[in-house]
Image: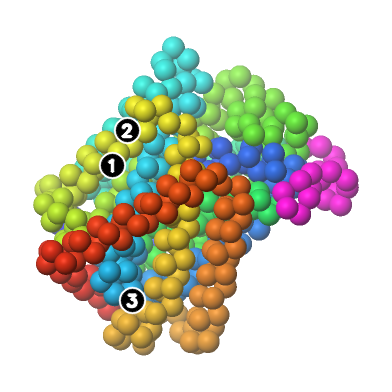
Amino acid sequence: MKPEEKNAGMSFWSIAMMGLGAVVGAGVVTYVGIAVNWTGRSAWLAYAVAILLGFLCNVPLILMTTAARIKGGNYSFMATTLGDLGGGYYGISRILMVLSFSTFSLSLGNYLNILIPAVPAKVFAYIGLILFGLVNLFGTNFMAKIQNLLSILLIVGLLVFGIYGVMNARSDSLQIMQPGYFSGGADGFWQAVMVLMASTTGYTLITSFSSSCRKPKTDLPLAMCIVPLMLVVLYCSVAFTMGNVLPVEETAGQPLTVVAKVLFHPALYYLFVIGGPVMALCTTLNSSYGIFERPLVQVASDGWLPSSLAAQNKYGVAWKFIVIFMVVGAIPMALNFSISTIVSNTTFVNSFGYILENIGVMRYPKKMDGAWENRAFKLPMWAFLAFCWVAILIRVYMMFRSLKTANITMVVGSLVAIVLILLWCVFRQKSGKVHVTKSWELQ
């Protein structure tokens, strides 16, 4: 346990705000315009469906968190339920998600450039990447206080945008059966759902803070149930505003600022940019450092990575990983990769990882001694397994949808990445350096 965790723990609302910040980020400020392009004015309905499907995908993992306190995030579960090699692959593959730091930073830079055009967007991106890395070096409690403040500003900013949008929407905005409301037809609607799901499921990553929770068996799962309800209000109102204030032709593929300029007085517009998009990206970037650092500490401690990487500073933070995240996040920006390029080259690998995660969760009643009997929410086995299969089917379908629009380069690159990660895990295991330890405990 980290030094700071011996004396204090994160409250329910701190965990909930961490979950909200983890999921509300680049997605809501960039994906909504893409969804409008696919399905037109019904983008808000697509978001509602995406939130529901995302929650169904997460239910098995949420139920699993009621059984034990874990040290290394979802990796701690997978290392037990999938076996050493399966757990190692899962843990190492999560490193690719660190590329998302570039996405968050670039998006943050683009919005800050709107406020101060004289400063290049990429300069702001580097500053944001480094700033929140430094914040996380001072430990979870300090980072959580920053997160709570940023999350409040975020909620206010997006709610103001949504409320103003509803008040100024077209009079026929709720007449969903009118021609053109679903401009892309059924295929376009489901493509929008697939795109939006990427911004509706990430709150389960707060399992990384299980060891810091005061009451992880109840607070953590309840927080992951509260966040989707918040998303319904925030996401659906934002998407409704994007699709029903201006003509679809003007908002399709565009950021929130296109509509915000019409809704707000110039002064309020700039406040919205800060309170909405900027705060959304700041909360995601801030929480992501801790979310990815915790599991990788356990991955390194188990030998899948050099154990020296798990060395902690006086605040209990594995500072080498924080530095690595900064470097990895900066490389795509230095190479001038676009946001879409970064996202597309990690989609397939991440989807495969999610399916593996669902399989691992399904095995926990038999593989984690005493955990099933210790669970806080006594759901019957048949219901738990039903949720697991629903989650797997949704993930498989969404991966199939992503392949329909993927380019061959992305597919080949993803397959190569999967093979390389597997080979690395086999190499580390045969070298005798891997010693997987139990990183969860009943409570």
Q: Is residue 171 above or below residue 197?
A: above
Residue 269 against residue 49 in the figure, above or below = above
Quadrant for the C terminus in the image: bottom left
> Earlier along the polypeptide chain: callout 2 or callout 3?
3
The residue under label 3 is: 81
Disc 3 element: helix
**Residue at (51%, 81%) from the top-left corner?**
385
Q: Residue at x 22, y 39 (%)?
A: 323
Q: Residue furthest right?
A: 178
Which quadrant does the N terminus fall into? Answer: bottom left
User: On the rendered structure, is 17 left or right of 304?
Assistant: right
Whether residues under marks 2 and 1 lie with C-beta atoms below 8 angstroms apart, the answer is no
| Label 2 sits on residue | 331
Tell me where residue 327 appears, x and y as whole percent.
27, 36
Callout 3 crowding tier (Cα within 10 Å): few <14, some 14–19, many ≥20: many
Secondary structure of the residue carrying numbered label 1: helix
Kindly tell me whether residue 345 is visible in this rendering: yes
Q: Few, some or many C-alpha atoms within 10 Å of disc 2 (few <14, some 14-19, many ≥20)? A: few
**Does residue 303 appear to the left or right of 40 in the view shown?**
left
State the CA–CA distance, disc 2 to disc 3. Answer: 34 Å
Dot 1, how many residues are within 10 Å of its Cα: few (below 14), some (14-19), or many (20+)? many
Residue 32 belongs to magenta span: no
Q: Which residue is mark 1?
A: 325
Stretch of the chain drawn in magenta:
167-188
Residue name at image x 44 percent, y 39 percent: 342
Q: Position of residue 77 (x, y in %)?
A: 32, 71
Quick one: label 3 or label 1, which is nearer the N terminus? 3
SS at circle 2: helix
